[in-house]
Image (cartoon, rainbow, N blue to C red):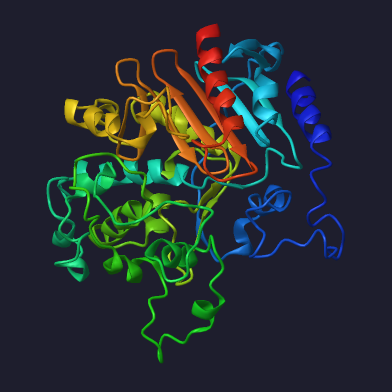
Amino acid sequence: MKKLALSTLGLISGLAYGGAMEAIPATSEGQVTLMNWTEQPYNHWAFRNAGVHPSLMVPRGGEISPIPYALDENLPTLSFKYQGEAYTVRDAMTADSTDGYIVIKNGKIIAEEYFNGMTERDHHLWASSTKSVVGQAMGLLVEQGKVSVDDMVQTYIPELKNTHFGKRTVRDVLNMVSALDYSEDYVNFTPGEVSTEYFRRLGFVPAFDIMASDPKKSDIPRSILEFLPEFEKNPDLEPRDRFEYHSPNVDIAGWIISRVSGQPLQTFVSENFWSKLGAEHDAFFMADVGYMPIATGGFNTTLRDFARVGLAMVNNGQYNGEQIFPKNWVKDTFKLTDKEREQMSNSIYKDPQSSVYDEWLEGYKNYLWVHDSKKGIATFRGVFGQHLYINQEKNIVIATFSSAESASNAARETNKPRLAAFEAIANHY
């Protein structure tokens, strides 16, 4: 009954979420389109129905591995302070337009709530949290001896030979120290700029001209992969000098995984770990304009299945009686070198004067945001508030799906109390 009570509370509180797609047919004011799908209130619906873009299935397999309940009814109202302000866990979540959150301690669900029309059965876009799972997928090929992180990218992708990306090492792209001449700006899109053209192929910005082009008659790069040779080196930066959050690095990793394995990324993910997690539902990848899976931010699952990935990470890759991710790779992902710490220290994220300063970050490795390498604390992070918090020391996993007002988690002030809530929960236990 307690499980039903919490779930029902979330469902009732989320009935009114802005009116997007509520009417049948949708009103002009409530219609989700490719122009408004990332904006509130439309993103509450769109992020649960990312099939507004092309999508590629990632089938589950085997028996469902249930996550037992041991609900703590006091956890949502657990109070803490951040920068002098008092919050509860629920307040910190809802203030940043959280659609659902789940807290798991010692393998048992201790809190689970849903808002804004979302339910436990709804899929939701992971956004850039997808990056972290692609990093673990790469670990499978490294473990098998099929990929070396010290090799140049062009070793695996001859199409990139003598390009800037081609001359980078696999480690450079896994740690985002590739020194791209590129801006990860989700607001200012200058026509013709490489970053704008990248986001147009991603589907973040509609590209109706590319969608309508005939690949038999036009040599315009349609997919992200076709566009990757266009990236050049930042003239003011050397590779491996500092961490810069640049999404195209992950598209390179996804391409390597597919090329080396001989499988489309969605098939590799399904066969190698999604089918082994005991997931409740199939997953899917959002696809780009060329109908290729978006490795950098296209994964979609239910909230509990998102958390199951965290349960594998918190246990060094093991879950559901399977070694989902290689143990040595997971442990190495948390283990930062002095150089990797220095690369983060040199980044804008550790500049106290920056709007994206992050007090929690120690480093970034294999697309994982590492908070504390000794305690095994890290996060998957996706724009608009998608988080997977992993605390190996306390055996805690927290997953959140959100449809926040703006994309950048680092710059959005309402996201910071949520990160503080993760620590408050861990400290409480």
Residue 323, x across and y down, in percent: 33, 33
Residue 12, x across and y down, in percent: 84, 33
What is the quadrant of residue 67 in the picture? top right
Residue 421, x across and y down, in percent: 57, 19
Residue 307, x across and y down, in percent: 52, 32
Image quadrant containing the N terminus: top right
Evaluate whether residue 328 shows in this view: no
Given the current orientation, which residue lies at the most extreme front position? 353
Left-right relation of 411 to 161? right
Given the current orientation, which residue lies at the most extreme bottom position? 217
Evaluate whether residue 371 shows in this view: yes
Viewer-side residue, 312 vs 94? 94
Q: Is residue 47 above or below residue 313?
A: below
What is the quadrant of residue 34 in the picture? bottom right
Viewer-side residue, 375 vs 280? 375
Q: Is residue 105 above or below residue 389?
A: above
Left-right relation of 59 to 89? left
What residue sits 24% from the left and 49% below the top?
178
Viewer-side residue, 353 vs 269? 353
Image label count = 0
